[in-house]
Image (cartoon, helix red, strand yellow):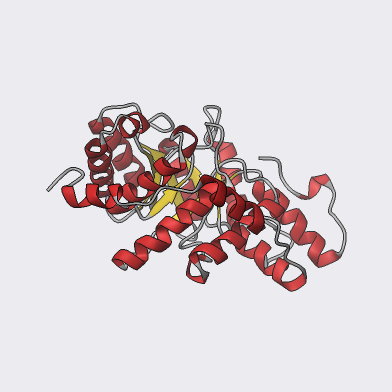
Amino acid sequence: MTGATASLRRTLDGLPGVDAVGLEARAASLGTRSIKTTAKQWAIDLAISMVDLTTLEGADTPGKVRALSAKALNPDPTDPSCPSAAAVCVYPDMVATVREVVGDRLHVAAVATAFPSGRAALDIKLADTQDAVEAGADEVDMVIDRGAFLAGNLDKVHDEIVAVKEAAGTAHLKVILETGELQTYDNVRRASWLAMEAGADFIKTSTGKIQPAATLPVTLLMLEAVRDHRIATGRQVGVKPAGGIRTSKDAIRYLVVVNEIAGEDWLSPDWFRFGASSLLNDLLLQRQKMITGHYSGPDYVTLD
């Protein structure tokens, strides 16, 4: 049976409304918690291991992508104890270039389905997905049709996710909600559940091309959704905030929220990722400071 079935519609209609004031207050409260010494060192290494190091620009070149891939594989060449990033995220035409560098040592994620707008016919979206997987992507980041969702055409959104999931085969599917365009927290909750019910392996906040991108309240809400979905179905789904997360302090705030809202099971790159480019540099600088006691110079990290 295709489409947003009566059962799914009952699930979505039965979701409680979001208390926006309470949500934002909870996120603000958790965001003030500090982590010190060895716990901070552990958190920084964990955050590094969760980064989907990303470049999604029209000016991307094979050389830039190779350099970024090498950095994801070995973020700190001076310290072999530094963990690798989780994945490199690129457009489908750059997947083979990434795979040449990382082999099977890192995940390769490709944005697909007419990223970032999602405005294309389904057959084009499916071809985009298949091209990425055939080139070597083992993760696909798709975008939902926000226009269809906001118009109430949940069948179309649901069916496209199901079809892309099938086209992706064994690759993990991350479904980008583009929460900055969904207008309300209630819509974020409904879109999260719709994506999970349609087969998403991860739900992702943003493309990074729209403001606001990832925010702590929206990520908290999505973590509540995956937690409650696992309670209801037994299936665990990951969360990926993307866009606007630039500092170690930001990343640690998110990890605190993950632990407090979803729990320790999500404190793993298998279940939580950061979609970022500049974040990795700050994590490396903070890591070096924790080890040596002083900040490294600006030439310690590469410019992406």
Q: Quadrant of residue 285?
A: bottom right
Q: Position of residue 296 (x, y in %)?
A: 84, 53
Q: Is residue 284 above or below residue 303?
A: below
Quarter of the C terminus within the rendering: top right
Pick the residue in front: 92 or 203.
Answer: 203
Q: Position of residue 192 (x, y in %)?
A: 38, 48
Q: Quadrant of residue 226?
A: bottom left
Q: Position of residue 168 (x, y in %)?
A: 29, 48
Q: Is residue 103 above or below residue 245?
A: below
Residue appearing at x 52%, y 70% in the figure = 264
Pick the residue in front: 106 or 240.
Answer: 240
In the rendered picture of this protein, how many numbered marks are placed on residues? 0
Pick the residue in front: 291 or 159.
Answer: 159
Regarding residue 151, the answer to whether it shows in the image is: yes
Query: Quick check: 116 left or right of 23?
Result: left
Residue appearing at x 35%, y 37% in the figure = 144
Regarding residue 241, the answer to whether it shows in the image is: no
Q: Which residue is situated farthest in the right direction here?
A: 294
Q: Is residue 211 above or below residue 37?
A: above
Query: Quick check: 11 left or right of 1?
Result: right
Q: Position of residue 156 (x, y in %)?
A: 24, 36
Query: Quick check: 280 left or right of 287?
Result: left
Residue appearing at x 23%, y 32% in the figure = 123
